Image: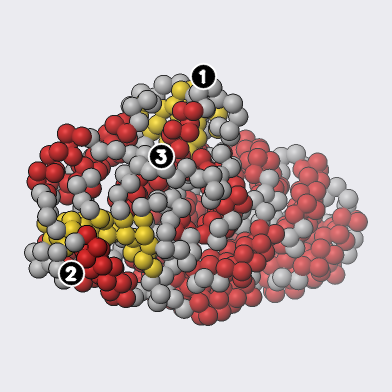
């Protein structure tokens, strides 16, 4: 958010009535936006021979975006009235616009030597100090401006911005609120409140504030841009795209909207489209520092690490913050397996922004992948500070449980993110019951029936409807951190989920005996960030169908079924119909089917965790850069004793993976014979 535009301070030393009248008329023209007419009047009426006339001319030049001419006018005012503080203060504004910050500071200091309590000079000085990133000093300068003029709205606004830069959002919020008491329609203060609420983790209030900014000024582009950024941050990316498209329809050269479009497409994993949007942004704004950082992140995702790092470095040279550029570098290096270098970059990013929740969160995954479980799980808890995390809603229901004695207390545990995470971490329910707590589990709606049958000793409720009172709440994924688990203490006993016996019998009759009965799953949720690398084209399973004695069964549901329509009959895959394929509450059916199969061969999806939790034999096909939970260079999983991992040795090479699986499948058929 930009600081408030520097304030012109006109003055009128001794001058005749005609000059005063001309100056008043010119000021009125400036107020009406008729800048050229005001300049013509100043020249025609001889007012440019006065210090106040030159000061007004300088202000007009600033409004027209011409700080060099403004500086000339202010210098003329200084020559004509060297003992007045106003020309020096205005001269500092022009020097600030020209980027000559030390000279600008000296000009404001000269003004204040003449008039120590000059509010405008203190204000301008605060703006210069902010540009120098001396935010504590800027706060002091704005405070002095307010001591001289307690009704100085701009000083409250800009002091709020300085507090925001110091990562003191609560104090920033107070300043913006004070500004709005003086000017309720000040859009900049509403925007500042929105940013402060976001930094404080209250997204609901952030939206209220940004909508108030747009109500005060429906054309305010800064508010519209921030609203798009907020939607992207909250993963409401489709909504953001609609608003971005509206902005670009109004102005195809809207640089901020183009930048938001590139970020949104990156989040949607539409990488080619995002790169095109990034190119469009940089074509219009070749020095857009953040645009280069986004482009670097994209190139890294697309496999070009060297190009990605070069683009990020260009962004840094152009002024991108350490917070964004170092995190982008760390992520790119981690994605390409450069773990030691990535950890070093994460350290540098955290030195620049120690409270960066996203940085801590992403470093946690790298540490877990590398086997640093104590440190990784502890750092994983930083996700709870993110404004888009489910914790922000649950925190309003009850206090966060951190592992303190809880016997007899009512504890709500909830699932977050995807079904797979819930099915993986629900293993902690028996341990929670052992604490003596009165446990209520709130998973995603589609898993309620399965989990209620598996854990009859606790309440399992859907995430809608009446919610009883609780003493504490915690996420299932926080359990390893709360219990301080290591690889050795992780609860790995399976099965911890079970299928309904009557449904097992139903599917046993329909599946029948004979052959090696292999269930397959190939497609995960398209909303998952890395789905393009974890999901597998069904055609790659063809070598399995060619193994004599193998019967393939599709356990795929909801998505990816169009591939089955094309290839299912060709590969001899048995389908289970609507009861599984289009059943939004189908995990209990899937569990019963898996109970009747000899082996599951799967991509990294929620059904993988279901099979492992049921204690079924699972062969998991993994990409070269697999998810953190499968760690590195292992053919087994500490999470599921019945699981075997088949990893790509070359990125994208599913053929090699399935050649090895088919070979192992042939050996399994022969072993069973």
Please give the name of the residue rendered at 38% of the width and 43% of the height, measured from the top-left corner: 494
Mark 2–mark 3 distance (CA, rounded to whole Å): 36 Å
- Label 2: element kind: loop
Q: Earlier in the sequence, mark 1 or mark 3?
A: 1
Q: Nearer the viewer, residue 521 or 155?
A: 521
Q: Mark number for residue 400?
A: none
Q: Earlier in the sequence, mark 2 or mark 3?
A: 3
Residue under numbered circle 3: 426
Residue under numbered circle 2: 547
Mark 1–mark 3 distance (CA, rounded to whole Å): 21 Å
Q: Residue furthest top?
A: 408
Visible residue check, residue 280:
no
Q: Image height check: is 34 above or below 648?
A: above
Residue 161: give x, y in percent of width and height.
66, 50
Residue under numbered circle 1: 408
- Label 3: element kind: helix
Q: Nearer the viewer, residue 605 or 546?
A: 546
Q: In the drawing, does residue 161 fall left or right of residue 420?
A: right
Q: Quadrant of the N terminus?
A: bottom right
Residue 393: give x, y in percent of width and height.
47, 35
Q: Earlier in the sequence, mark 1 or mark 2?
A: 1
Q: Tell me which corner region of the image, top left, top right, bottom left or bottom right, holds residue 430.
A: top left
Q: Quadrant of the C terminus?
A: bottom left
Please give the name of the residue rendered at 31% of the width and 72% of the height, measured from the top-left corner: 660
Residue 428: give x, y in percent of width and height.
45, 38
């Amino acid at each position: 958010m930009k600081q408030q535009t520097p304030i012109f301070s006109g003055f009128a030393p001794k001058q005749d009535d005609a000059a005063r009248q001309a100056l008043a008329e010119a000021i009125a023209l400036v107020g009406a936006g008729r800048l050229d007419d005001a300049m013509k009047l100043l020249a025609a009426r001889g007012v440019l021979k006065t210090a106040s006339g030159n000061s007004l001319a300088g202000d007009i030049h600033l409004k027209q975006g011409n700080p060099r001419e403004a500086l000339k006018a202010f210098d003329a005012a200084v020559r004509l009235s060297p003992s007045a503080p106003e020309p020096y203060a205005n001269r500092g504004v022009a020097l600030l616009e020209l980027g000559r910050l030390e000279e600008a500071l000296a000009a404001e200091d000269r003004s204040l030597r003449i008039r120590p309590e000059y509010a405008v000079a203190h204000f301008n000085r605060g703006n210069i100090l902010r540009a120098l990133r001396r935010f504590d000093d800027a706060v002091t300068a704005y405070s002095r401006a307010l001591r001289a003029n307690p009704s100085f709205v701009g000083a409250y606004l800009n002091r709020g911005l300085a507090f925001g830069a110091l990562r003191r959002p609560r104090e920033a919020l107070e300043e913006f609120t004070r500004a709005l008491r003086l000017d309720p329609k000040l859009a900049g203060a509403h925007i500042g409140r929105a940013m402060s609420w976001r930094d404080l983790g209250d997204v609901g209030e952030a939206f209220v504030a940004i909508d108030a900014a747009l109500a005060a000024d429906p054309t305010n582009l800064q508010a519209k841009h921030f609203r798009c950024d907020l939607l992207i941050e909250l993963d409401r990316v489709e909504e953001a795209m609609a608003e971005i498209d509206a902005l670009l329809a109004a102005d195809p050269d809207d640089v901020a909207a183009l930048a938001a479009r590139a970020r949104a497409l990156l989040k949607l994993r539409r990488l080619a489209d995002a790169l095109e949007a990034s190119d469009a942004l940089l074509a219009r704004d070749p020095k857009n520092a953040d645009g280069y950082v986004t482009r670097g992140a994209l190139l890294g995702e697309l496999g070009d690490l060297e190009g990605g790092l070069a683009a990020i470095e260009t962004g840094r040279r152009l002024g991108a913050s350490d917070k964004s550029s170092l995190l982008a570098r760390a992520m790119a290096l981690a994605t390409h397996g450069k773990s030691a270098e990535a950890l070093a970059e994460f350290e540098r990013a955290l030195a620049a922004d120690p409270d960066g929740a996203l940085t801590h969160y992403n470093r946690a995954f790298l540490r877990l992948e590398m086997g640093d479980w104590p440190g990784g799980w502890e750092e994983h808890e930083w996700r709870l500070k993110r404004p888009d995390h489910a914790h922000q809603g649950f925190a309003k229901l009850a206090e966060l449980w951190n592992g303190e004695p809880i016997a007899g207390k009512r504890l709500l545990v909830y699932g977050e993110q995807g079904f797979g995470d819930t099915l993986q971490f629900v293993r902690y329910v028996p341990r929670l019951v052992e604490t003596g707590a009165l446990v209520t589990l709130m998973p995603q709606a589609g898993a309620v029936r399965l989990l209620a049958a598996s854990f009859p000793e606790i309440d399992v409720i859907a995430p809608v409807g009446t919610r009883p009172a609780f003493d504490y709440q915690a996420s299932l994924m926080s359990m390893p951190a709360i219990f301080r688990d290591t690889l050795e203490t992780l609860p790995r006993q399976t099965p911890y989920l079970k299928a309904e016996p009557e449904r097992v019998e139903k599917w046993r009759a329909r599946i029948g005996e004979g052959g090696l009965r292999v269930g397959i799953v190939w497609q995960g949720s398209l909303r998952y960030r890395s789905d393009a690398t974890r999901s597998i084209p069904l055609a790659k399973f063809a070598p399995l169908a060619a193994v004599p004695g193998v019967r393939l069964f599709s356990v795929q549901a909801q998505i990816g079924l169009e591939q089955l329509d094309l290839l299912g009959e060709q590969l001899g895959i048995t389908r289970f119909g609507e009861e599984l394929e289009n059943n939004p509450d189908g995990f209990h059916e899937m569990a019963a089917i898996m109970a009747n199969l000899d082996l599951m061969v799967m991509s990294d999806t929620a059904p993988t965790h279901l099979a492992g939790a049921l204690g079924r034999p699972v062969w998991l096909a993994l990409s070269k850069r697999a998810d953190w939970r499968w760690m590195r260079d292992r053919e087994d999983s500490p999470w599921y004793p019945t699981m075997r991992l088949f990893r790509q040795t070359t990125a994208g090479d599913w053929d090699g993976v399935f050649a090895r699986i088919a070979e192992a499948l042939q050996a399994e058929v022969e072993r069973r014979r």
